[in-house]
Amino acid sequence: MSAPLRELDAAGLDRLVGAGAPVLAEFFGPDCAICRRLEPMLGAVAASAGDKLAVVRVDAGADRALAERLAIRSVPTLILYNRGDARARRTGFATARELRAWIAPEIET
């Protein structure tokens, strides 16, 4: 089962991260094939995490200033935020199982 993902701009991401709850943000490109393959994996993670984790997408090409500020060099890049800080980062494809294992330490604490 997959949950729909919200797409945010820089202001929306900053507000969500600033709230302090865990956030998994995917920085994607609309023409990125790997990003399209990753989307259902993120949807599955969002569905299983429920309200413990917000999973969102940010178009890295639409806001170059945000991509520069966050040092997004390639897509897809995933950044896991918790308590207002970037806690982990990874680039490329991952299965839903791999993503759940990667985020587990942050959403369980």
Image: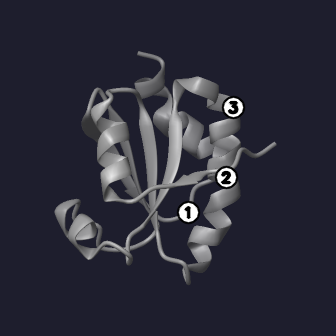
- For mark 2, give the secondary structure: helix
The residue wearing badge 2 is 41
Callout 1: SS: loop
Mark 2, Cα crowd under 10 Å, few <14 / some 14-19 / many 20+, is many
Q: Position of residue 29 (x, y in %)?
A: 48, 76
For the C terminus, the quadrant is top left
Residues 26 and 108: in front is 26
Residue type at tag 3? Ser
Cα separation, mark 1 vs mark 3, equals: 19 Å
Q: Are marks 3 and 2 in contact (CB under 8 Å)?
A: no
Check the picture and name the quadrant holding the N terminus.
top right
Say what amino acid the circle numbered 2 marks.
Met
First along the sequence among labels 3 and 2: 2
Dots 1 and 2: beta carbons under 8 Å? yes
Tell me if mark 3 has few (under 14), some (14-19) or many (20+) residues whose alpha carbon lies within 10 angstroms of its own. some
- Residue at image x 57%, y 69%? 35
Can you identify the residue that label 1 sits on?
A: 93
Quadrant location of residue 61? bottom left
> Residue 100: x, y in percent?
58, 36
Q: Earlier in the sequence, mark 1 or mark 3?
A: 3
Q: Disc 1 vs disc 2: which is toward the camera?
A: 2
Q: Identify the residue at the far left of this view.
A: 69
Q: Could you say which disc has been placed on residue 48 in the image?
A: 3
